[in-house]
């Protein structure tokens, strides 16, 4: 039997192709997720801009309402001041004095509110250019990735097709005595049903193999791991 049809050699080559297909499919599966991530980033950036605009509108409305209130309070204060100056009844005088103090406090609070709202509006306005830049960047990244992803997807799909064609030429070489085991393993775990042996251990489960198993592997015979059941083979560069 030539080296090319020895089980260990065939399974090594088969595993390499299965791994290549798996890695390509893994990257293909990541593409939509990466696009979704960029889309969510854009949505998030646009929401921040919308939130800022809503905050500006709300703050400006509140500022207008506060300014109207301030105008009314100022007019009321002037009224109380005139009445206070004209009052001759001590009780009326004290009542007006109390009302003036209350109104003065309300005026101060309203002025503070207006000042805080003006500060909030200025700070929010200052953020808008950065929010616009974030949106533009997110759009650019998404558009760029969309274009790149289309080419990447086509390339990966072509690679998978090539690997599958290569696999189709290798699988018939698997000895019939072991093909059923291989096909069950492939159906259950695809690439994960095979593993190389290094330092007298299965590289998948790290279980040590016996000397006899190592000897069989060295001679490219069919060997399976006693612990995990994977088909074992000797590493190589062919």
Image (cartoon, rainbow, N blue to C red):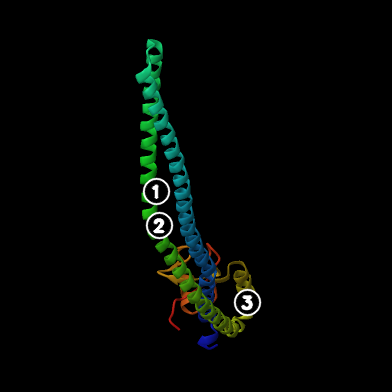
Among numbered discs 3 and 1, the one appearing first in the sequence: 1
Tag on residue 65?
Answer: none
Q: Position of residue 152 (x, y in %)?
A: 50, 77
- CA gap, disc 2 and disc 3: 65 Å
Neighbour class for label 1 at 10 Å: few (<14), some, many (≥20)?
many
Please report the residue visible at 42 percent of the width from the left and 61 percent of the height from the top. 132
How many numbered discs? 3
SS at mark 3? Answer: helix
Disc 2 and disc 1 in contact, CB within 8 angstroms: no
**Mark whose residue sits in front, 2 or 3:** 2
- Answer whether residue 216 is visible to the viewer in this image: no
Among numbered discs 2 and 1, the one appearing first in the sequence: 1
**Mark whose residue sits in front, 2 or 1:** 1
Identify which residue, 199 or 32, lies in the foreground.
32
- CA gap, disc 2 and disc 1: 11 Å
Q: Position of residue 212 (x, y in %)?
A: 48, 71
Among numbered discs 2 and 3, the one appearing first in the sequence: 2
Q: Give the answer, above or below, for where 146 lies relative to 97.
A: below
- CA gap, disc 3 and disc 1: 73 Å
Residue at numbered disc 2: 128
On-image quarter of the N terminus: bottom right
Neighbour class for label 3 at 10 Å: few (<14), some, many (≥20)?
some
Residue at numbered disc 3: 179
Residue at numbered disc 1: 121
Q: Give the answer, above or below, for where 173 lies relative to 203.
A: below
């Amino acid at each position: 039997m030539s080296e090319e049809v020895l089980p260990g050699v065939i399974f090594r080559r088969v595993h390499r192709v299965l791994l290549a297909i798996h890695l390509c499919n893994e990257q293909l599966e990541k593409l939509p997720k990466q696009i979704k991530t960029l889309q969510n980033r854009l949505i998030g950036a646009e929401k921040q801009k919308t939130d800022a605009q809503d905050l500006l509108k709300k703050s400006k409305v509140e500022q207008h309402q506060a300014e109207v209130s301030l105008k009314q309070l100022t007019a009321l204060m002037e009224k109380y001041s005139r009445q206070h100056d004209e009052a001759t009844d001590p009780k009326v005088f004290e009542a007006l004095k109390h009302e003036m103090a209350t109104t003065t406090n309300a005026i101060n609070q309203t002025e503070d509110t207006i000042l805080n709202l003006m500060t909030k509006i200025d700070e929010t306005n200052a953020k808008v250019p950065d929010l616009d830049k974030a949106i533009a960047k997110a759009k650019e990244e998404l558009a760029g990735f969309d274009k790149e992803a289309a080419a990447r997807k086509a390339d990966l799909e072509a690679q998978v097709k090539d690997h599958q064609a290569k696999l189709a030429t290798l699988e018939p070489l698997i000895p019939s005595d072991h093909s059923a085991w291989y096909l069950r393993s492939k159906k259950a775990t695809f690439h994960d049903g095979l593993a190389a042996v290094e330092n007298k251990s299965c590289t998948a489960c790290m279980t040590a193999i016996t000397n006899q198993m190592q000897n069989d592997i060295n001679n490219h015979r069919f060997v399976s791991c006693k612990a995990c059941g994977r088909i074992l083979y000797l590493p190589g560069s062919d």
